[in-house]
Amino acid sequence: MVHLEFYDGSGQASCEELNEYMRQKKEILTRAQAGEEQYRDSLGWLSVDEWAGEERIAEIETFAKRVRDDGDILVVIGIGGSNQAARAVTCALPNQSKVKVLYAGNNISSAYMKQILAQLDGKSVYINVIAKNFETMEPGIGFRILRQYLRKRYGADYNSRVFATGTRGSELQELCVAHGYTFLDFPEDIGGRYSALCNVGLFPAAVAGIDIRAMVSGARDMEQNLKTAAGAENSAFQYAAIRNVLYQKGFRMEMLASFEPRYQYFNGWWTQLFAESEGKDGKGLYPVAVKYSEDLHSIGQFVQEGTPVLFETFLDIENPDEELILEADDVDDGFDYLNGADLREVNRAAFLATFQAHSERLPCVRLKIKELNEYSFGQLFYFFEFACYLSGSMLGVNPFNQPGVENYKGYMFQALGKHK
Ligand code: PA5
């Protein structure tokens, strides 16, 4: 499980105020554990087995095998919650299949799309378009360009290379029926940013050879824990409470930090989850993420001496997997104090030193994770989704809508001549 420690900014662990806040908000945990009626149509992720039970996993594996047996490249076409979780795991974990997963439909850059297309010739290519609401322009454009590419290369049979993840009854499903594409469910009762553990996140991961059963098992164990643990025993509740207590004290930013660059895209997933879920009604913590140790040489200065608006949440991997010993060298480069050291120990020393320095100045949360692997990714996805539901509820916002993202679209569609 994820183990959590909180330091209040003076270098000391602080409990009293937090415990009082958790006592006041305990009903929120009880309601979330049961799943509230008011959010019923957004809580499909709350029970992992609903969309990642044995039958669905078997179907994903069958589809993924088709791509893995014949393909070299899978282009995932999606944006926001429709691609972040898959990208987080496929870019962090070693690819166990010969299929390389690329990501498109997440921007409108012609140069980016040309770079994607340039990688496809001579390869066996499959695509997976993922869109809950098939009106989103970026995946719409990406799908059209890549579909046309496939049709030119493979003729009428191109359709067997198209997997489409959409909601039942959607226009995307109608296209699947009309053109013979393979259809996968995008659960109606799961919003994009909560969709890591269903077809949306799991199918591309399975194509990349990720052990999705281990991922689901991690999520399921986390679900079991978070749905039964009460009050301060519940790490997601504790984390949500810390966020809200600090928000009430005037902190306006939460920075997710780790010393593992493989979390790069997980950072993006986390940022989206909290930004879209909580940033509304004039409220919410602004979520940002950093990659240490690199960002200690830039953001680190701000953290240590800049405007005191942020607190920091560290992902602490207790057992990093890759040993690398620094050999002694006959060139006198001034680094002999590291002779024979394992890079994992050096990284750990940098982490502990940073944690000490930062926690003496600002509140810091330490989330301890055993290892970076499929199982822990499943745990983290579920942990943060559940915590975000709790945290948004404490803040008094609806964690499942995103009305603000519509505003710019009106102007954009007007400029582009879209009339319906
Ligand atoms: O979390 C969300 O709901 C959003 O970020 C969506 O995932 C994102 O806007 C993409 O939507 P769609 O899948 O409809 O293209």
Image (cartoon, grey):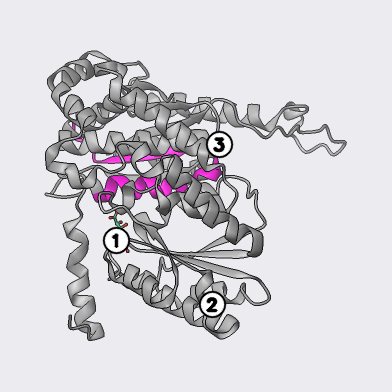
Mark 3 residue type:
Asn
Check the picture and name the quadrant holding the N terminus: top left
The one of 168 and 260 positioned closer to us in this rendering: 168
Marks 1 and 3, how far apart at CA? 32 Å
Q: Quadrant of residue 69?
A: bottom right
The single residue placed furthest to the right in the displayed view is: 330
Q: Nearer the viewer, residue 251 or 332?
A: 251
Q: Pick whichever of labels 1 and 3 is earlier in the sequence.
A: 1
Q: Is residue 308 visible?
A: no
Please tell me how crowded label 2 is: few (under 14), some (14-19), or many (20+) other residues with Cα within 10 Å. many
Compared with 347, 283 (above or below) is below
- Secondary element at tag 2: helix
**Residue 158 circle label:** 2
* Extent of the magenta region: 249-276
**Residue type at numbered disc 2:** Tyr
Mark 1 and mark 2 in contact (Cβ < 8 Å)?
no
Could you say whether the residue bearing mark 1 is in a helix, strand or loop?
Answer: loop
The earlier-in-sequence mark between 3 and 2 is: 2
Question: Taking 218 as reference, is 40 left or right?
Answer: left
Q: CA distance from mark 3 to mark 2?
A: 35 Å
Amino acid type, mark 1: Arg
**Label 2, label 1: how far apart the Cα atoms are:** 23 Å
Q: Is residue 174 magenta?
A: no
Which residue is label 1 attached to? 168
* Secondary structure beneath label 3: loop
Choose mark 3 or mark 2, whichever is in front.
2
Q: How many numbered circles does the render carry?
A: 3
Q: Is residue 226 above or below residue 391?
A: above
At horizontal 18% and vertical 42% (from top left) the residue drawn is 40
Q: Callout 3 environment at 10 Å: few (<14), some (14 to 19), or many (20+)?
A: many
Kindly identify the residue that appears in the image at 11 percent across and 49 percent down.
281
Task: Indicate which disc residue 373 carries.
Answer: 3
